[in-house]
Amino acid sequence: MTLKRTCDGYVRRDFLRVGSLTATSFSLANYLQMASAGEIRPGAKGKAAIFIDLNGGPSHIDTFDPKPEAGDDVRGKFTTIDTNVPGIRISEHLPKLAQCADKFAILRGVSHTLAAHRLGSEYVNTGSRPLASLEYPGFGAVVTRELSVAPELPPFVAIPRGNQRAGFLGIQYAPMNTGASPTAGQAFSVRGISLDNGMTVEQIERRQGLLKDLDRAFAEVEQQEQLLVGLNRFNEKAFAMITSPKAREAFDISREDPSFAKQFSEHAFSQSCLLAIRLVEAGVRFVSLSLGGWDTHTDNFTKLSTKLLPELDAGLSALYVGLAQRGLLDSTSVMCTGEFGRTPKINTRSAEGGRDHYPRCMFMLMAGGGMRGGQVIGESDDTAAGPRHTGIKPDDVAASFYHSLGIDHSKEFHTETGRPIMIVRDGKVIPELFA
Amino acid sequence: MRLCSFVMVAFLASGLLPWLAAPEAQATDGGTLPPIFERFAAGDPERGPTVNEVPNFQKHISPLMGRLGCNGRACHGSFQGQGGFTLSLFGYDFDADYKALMEEDSSRLDTRDVTASLILAKPIDADVHEGGQRFQEGGWEYWVVRKWIEAGAPYESRQIEKLSRLEVLPNELQFTDSKQTQQLQVIAHWENGTSEDVTCLSRYQSNDTSIAEIDEAGLVTSADPGDTHVVISYDNAVVPIQIIRPASLELAHNYPPLEFNTEVDRLVLNKLRKVGVLPSDVCSDETFLRRASLDVTGTLPTAEEVIAFENDSRPDKRHAKIEELLSRPGYAAQWTTFLCDITGNNDDQLNNFMPQGVSPANQWYRWIYSRIQDNVPYDVLVEGIVTATSRKPDESYREYCEAMSEICRDATGEKFAERPGMVHYWARRNFQSSEDRVVGFAYAFLGVRIQCAQCHKHPFDQWAKSDFENFERLFTGVQANQNTRGSDAKRVMDEMLSELEIDKSLKGNLLRRELAKCLNEGGTVPLPELVLRNEPVRTKDKNTKTAKGAETRKAKLLGGEWVNLDQDDVRSKLMQWLRDPNNPYFAKAFVNRVWTQYFGVGIVNPADDLNLANAPSNAPLLDHLAAGFIASNYDMKWLHREILNSDTYQRSWLANDTNRLDKKNFSHALLRRLPAESTYDAVRMALASDEYALRAQELDIDRAITRSGASARAPGRDDESYALSVFGRSVRETNCDCDRSSEPSLLQTVFLINDTAVQSWLSDPRNSWVSSVGRKLQLGQTEPAVSKSTSAETPPAMQGFIKQIQRLDDRLDEAQAQGNETLVSQLQEKRSELRKRAMSVARKNGQQDQLRALMGETSSPDPESAAETTASAIGSQDLEWLIDQAYLRTLSRRPDNSEISLAKKYFEEEESPTAAIEGLMWSLVNTKEFILNH
């Protein structure tokens, strides 16, 4: 292996051997070892993760951080209800989540300063405040790199697509986008991984047989060239994935036990939650889901009460409960967040008012992976205008998320230019989550 | 080296007045001062060495701290510091470091109670110091620091001396075996004529420890054969020393007299001789044609072209082919994409600049394309970017708007090529601050990663923070965004807005939307323009009261002269400096990048990191190309010809026993994955009909290589965007050649073996080669063979569709019966819509057959009867022609006998002739031979 200096003299291994003229330091086994991902740190409970992205930035006051005592201009139209955890109350439009509040922790008074959708989104999807000069990898990309996965499965799936990109880690850690959401009761497939183009398994096997016969141009050097080794590995994995029933069946929610599936509503988000459970159960490491429409500058209350909250309530509660029923909640870390909260003060631009971007105060939900549910961590002030005390940074939540998966958030990766970058630059694990 | 005695400079001041003068050591005879560890070797354990010399902060203390690792990133060089003590990362910020040491109440340095000074107490005590023991009490390092403190820790920022040269002896190392050693000697030559042996104060690093290691004392130990550099740093100097251990000693001593025809080959062979490596043979004609077509024009040769080249018996046919390729539109598109990568043509970063609907990215692409096509000299092209103005000389704002409005109505961006300046370069969102501009400019046109020096001394180059800041001031005078317009434009703009009846108070996107409307209606709209603001430059930190006010009217070219900023457009000075034949980077960066495109590895590698430590693997070669490029007046085609016509470019990938492991001296071709655009275009062309392929080659139809901008965040959802993002097209975002990825990935393979896009190119009834062959050989329909599991039951998801279609069919019958043609066509349209939707659902569920059957369409042929026809349907002559063609259009060569018989065998096994041809094509585009340029 070539040892290549990085910006500060750190020595980095590089696959491309450029200088040496002997093979003594090259070993295929070594390469394969490096190419395959690291192992889970013993003791960590999370073996997989699900990330739910509430695009647009949901109001915290109208959901998980209600302020019933605040004035009319802040409180809003909704009342609060009890949950199955004494002392925790949430919005009346989240009744199903209220009944499983023991399964997740509510983080209140999470705070940052990026009020634009894209920047806020990059922040909460990476755990590091975005930089112009560098793109941080999303959670899923890091998990893909750190945890290994069965050969016939994709490591990272985004339904239908997400905000987590591979960033400087490189395209190989990018998610596999499903491109669409599943529909209740129907088979579902993903771009490229199932045989939905009329080909049969027998046919693709015949083709693969021909390919193996014909692909002999580099046969003599096949084992010496890492590029060729890599291409062969990808071919085997892709072929395994496509021809094995495992990936296809994991995506096919119509195979789900009807009594289990019926807990999920017909809505695309709920069905995506069902798909996420199937994927995690099959061994996929990271699934990201998204539910958009939270940018309620106008008609905040109608949009929330008639559409957004019922959809979220149905899907997310079914996800938590379903994971628990399958015995997967303890080994699956679940994080749910928007890119920011919304202004406590209700604007008057539309008849019933709306709320605007507000990163200074927001909520996040954390569950599973050994994190203790049924608790509220952090607190916002009387009008939910900011954290009452120090506040929780997205970085801290990210550090905790990684911690639940046994990934050391302070580990450093190196960019292509050799710059050392910590997974989460500035975060501390939140101890209450693991208490 | 003999020991010298010292004479002391007059001792004018006590330790209390250190800044006046400190006694400094000098060699009596004007020779070189011996190493400081000899001068400060421990004498009396209490009082130390008996020297009167006072160590110098710049020359001794600061380098010592660097060498001991004090200012490393993990230690006090960290931006947060360590234990409250922060040093500048990698040193060379003497003022800041001295200040940090002298900080009041920090006890880091105590001239009254010297031994209590933390910089003495900490490094000797492993227990108290988190960084462990750095030197021993009583050792020479200890005494150097202690004597300096005892003398009052003198330092005066005005006395910083300039290092004129760092000499390393020997200046090149040749080893013949492993575990051989060689001690380096490092001598600092100062501008005042003095010199000192600084071997024990320098830092050492090996660029490849598998070839040579170097310890902290400068002792080099050889390891594997190969060549690399060790890098020596002291003060602001960075010196690479080449280390060679030949792969074959015998070869190195008795190198065969190899013939060469070009200067490039001569220089490459010179290096190969040194490392004892023989080059591979020149590759076959077919390999050459495929390689050069992909590299020069971004896609494969057509099948016909391969045959024609095979039959061409002219001895200079390769040369002629190179000329032909360089004159194709594909050449212009390929190298426009290359320049768009480097200059950063990115939709995201440009998306607010022009009125909505206008694509600056298209304009950018076309502007460069037209210049590449006309082979405009590289420096002239760059000048159009670097000194870009929106208006032509003497053009009024209104005239500019009239001309540009017309240009903006051309969605292709082609008309923009007429404009002299490519202002969009300056209008990108990530190119607005002067820091971003320095970084982006240095990346694009110098191939230098100056960003390191934004915060600290560049660890591998001469650049200090001050160099960055002095250079940065050249970039402060330009403004270009959606709101910038010249001072003479305000009134005209108001007039124009009135004429267009646009509310003058509109701003931002609202205004852009209105302007877009008027633009589309043919109006002249007040467009933004690049403006120069020749105002005093504000210092970054308003609170610092430095005397910068006066100084900031000057800027300094990187490693060059000072430039007065009181002139109209300082960018012309910048351009003058760039194209000056003595500029150390401009030509080199370009020739090295182009070389990297052709070989996969740069002469300096990575190609965007020209720095002193990252030495070229073949300096004479880089010098030759750069000098020739300049001498040709920056003629880009000269450069391409110079490279393409060399044997070095035309070598086979097949290695011999001596060069198998060489990846940097160009002794054989390296296997390279095709770039994203080439992959997309090559797969499509290989699978497309002859006619389509030819049109694609001529750029009659859009290709991936004609895609203008890049957008990392919203890559688009169509097949092309998907494929390009999976294959790592440059995102053009971070000023790094690594924005483009040539790494293979799982999703790439999944795409090639099973994506619906590839499947549809394979079987597309209009444009695919398979279907055109099917027609030619009369093989019947080209629908892909379908799943055998046809069931008569209606799948639940289909029931709704089927009912609706049946209802429509009934109504259609009625309408036809009535002769109501309007209604018939309406219904037919509806039915086809519905069918499309039903099919797409069916496809997701793998139920196309059922659906077709249910809709009363002919189902696929029965596999058994098909099997009968497969072998017999195609005559043996046709079959051989077909296999031959399949190879020519994918691998650009003819199949050998064993390949022909394997393919024939497959044809016998496959269900239908069409399925067999598709299967063959599928297999060929999935070979490594296809996806790699070799």
Image: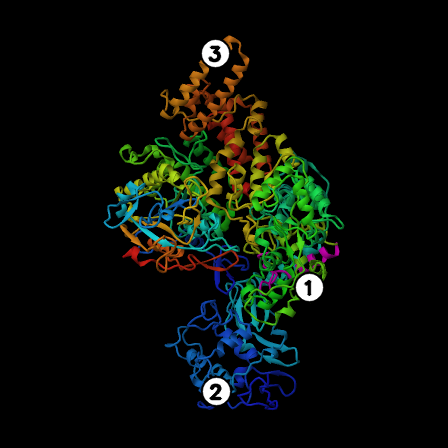
Look at discs 2 and 3 and give the one toward the viewer. Answer: 3
Q: B672 or A385: which is nearer to us? A: A385
Residue holding disc 3: B813
Q: Position of residue B830 (x, y in %)?
A: 49, 21
Label of residue B664 in the image: none
- Callout 2 secondary element: loop
Q: Position of residue B506 (x, y in %)?
A: 58, 45
Can residue B373 be seen here? Answer: no
Q: Residues within 10 Å of mark 3 (few under 14, many from 20)?
A: few
Magenta span: B605-632
Quarter of the image where the N terminus of chain B is located: bottom right
Q: Amino acid at mark 3?
A: Asp
Sequence-wise, which precedes: disc 2 or disc 3?
A: 2
Q: Are marks 1 and 2 on the same chain?
A: yes
Q: Quadrant of residue A204?
A: top left
Chain letter of the residue carrying label 2? B
Q: Residue furthest top?
A: B818
Label of residue B565 in the image: 1
As measured in the structure, the alpha-carbon distance from the residue carrying label 1 to the one carrying label 3 is: 82 Å
Quick check: is B622 in the magenta stretch?
yes
Q: Position of residue B930 (x, y in %)?
A: 55, 40
Residue holding disc 2: B42
As measured in the structure, the alpha-carbon distance from the residue carrying label 2 to the one carrying label 3 is: 111 Å
Q: Residue at x 46, y 87 (%)?
A: B112
Can residue B586 be seen here? Answer: yes
- Callout 3 secondary element: helix
Q: Position of residue B825 (x, y in %)?
A: 53, 17
Look at discs 1 and 3 and give the one toward the viewer. Answer: 1
Q: Amino acid at mark 2?
A: Ala
